[in-house]
Image (cartoon, rainbow, N blue to C red):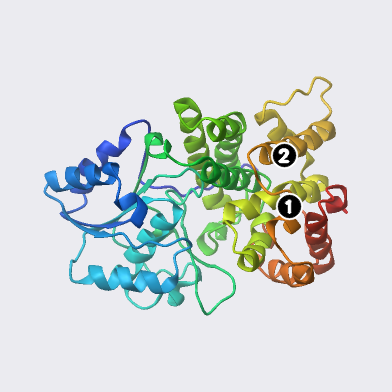
Amino acid sequence: MTLFAAIRLPQEILFGKGQRHALPHIAERLGKRALLCTDERFAGTAVFADIVKTLEAASIAVLIHDGVQPDVPSETVSVCVQEARTFHPDMVIGIGGGSCLDMAKCAALLLSHGGQLKDYYGEYKVPGPTLPIIAVPTTAGTGSEVTPVAVISDSERTLKVGISSPYLIATTAICDPELTMTCPPGLTAVAGADALTHAIEAFTAARRGNDPLLAQKHVFIGKSALTDHFALLAIKLLGRSLEKACKDGSDEDARADVMMGALAAGCAFGTAGTAAAHAIQYPAGALTHTAHGLGVATMMPYVMNYNRSASAAEMAEIGTALGLDNANGDEEELAVAAIEEIRRLFAAIGITRTLADLGLAADKLDWTAEQAFGIDRLIKNNPRPFDLDAMKRLVRAAYDGDLAASAI
């Protein structure tokens, strides 16, 4: 028997229009005191006021921290935790984009185990369960509502850093597509492209085998039968509806598809992991100060073409999930068509075409490649191996916009 699968998910995932109204019932099962992490913009909305009102009507005391900033600077987590310690919350609720959900995870971690965030950087550093976390995303992209990862910015480091542990998986994820209806086209595009990149990298990740200790020692463990299921669902939904949602934000069906796609992509990559596109984005994003989703999506067609020689079968399945015609049954032809369709889709929603367009300086290409090559947890997940020269060629190809050169 060679079939292997592994997956880690919240205890409960709720998806659908109006599901945010279940929040008080879920919260009252966890305690009577809730720390709410959100950002200043969402805290000023009528929807947020209504959420707080329903929690208080359920006799849940609420402490609001509305100071979440993009990319979660580590010092802001300390501020949140200091505010919350004397409140003694029974749970932490993250409401907003991925940064709000990551703040909730980090706050729950420090409130439960103390210390500093840097004590937990890396994999499996969290010593035990945290306060229960309820994740309520208002964007469709990061998948943080179901993943075991929190990403933060540390002023002492050039690159963003991650804390990865199954203990950071939310107890409950509530995904209500109505909360994304006012998301502007640019953010819809960048977040959705991030989700599609998650799904593609999870589906094409290296297959590690069935070592019984693999999942006990590593958070990202490569593709498996279960992660493939979620990844293909995400690719199908995002492929058919992301462009629609960007063009018409009032399209409820498209919004639901995109949010379900982002959720499914999170379910996939939270165990399978991501690979080279993410590895290159970390240094490229640090230098260009551009959105994470924009960077990984810029890289995705070039990384797909680099990996095509090792993952033609998976690329062809991606083409099928995207609804591409394969009348003659040629796997290689369908794989190439899948890459071109991803390139077309990203261009249609405004994703930058090259690293040069992203703003990366030509004299930083080698540094970017060196930094990316050093992110072992992602590079070892890539289906086609790298050496440093190969990474430099890929980064150069993505800078020049030379898709053909990315396969060399």
Residue 314 numbered mark, or none:
2
* Above-or-below relation of 155 to 21: below
* Above-or-below relation of 334 to 157: above
In which quadrant is the C terminus drawn?
bottom right
Residue 238 numbered mark, or none:
none
**Classed neighbour count for the residue bearing mark 1: other residues with Cα under 10 Å, few (<14), some (14–19), many (≥20):** many
Front residue (pair 287, 157):
287
Looking at the image, residue 356 sits to the left or right of residue 75; the answer is right
Q: Secondary structure at mark 2?
A: helix
Residue 297: image x %, image y %?
65, 49
Contact (Cβ within 8 Å) of mark 1 with mark 2? yes
Residue type at the position of mark 2: Glu
Residue type at the position of mark 1: Pro
Looking at the image, residue 264 sits to the left or right of residue 17; the answer is right
Residue plotted at (34% across, 57% down):
40
Asked where in the image residue 313 lies, by quadrant, the reply is: top right
Q: Secondary structure at mark 1?
A: loop
Residue 383 numbered mark, or none:
1
Label 1 vs 2, first from the N-terminus: 2
Residue plotted at (53% across, 40% down):
185
Residue 303: image x %, image y %?
74, 51
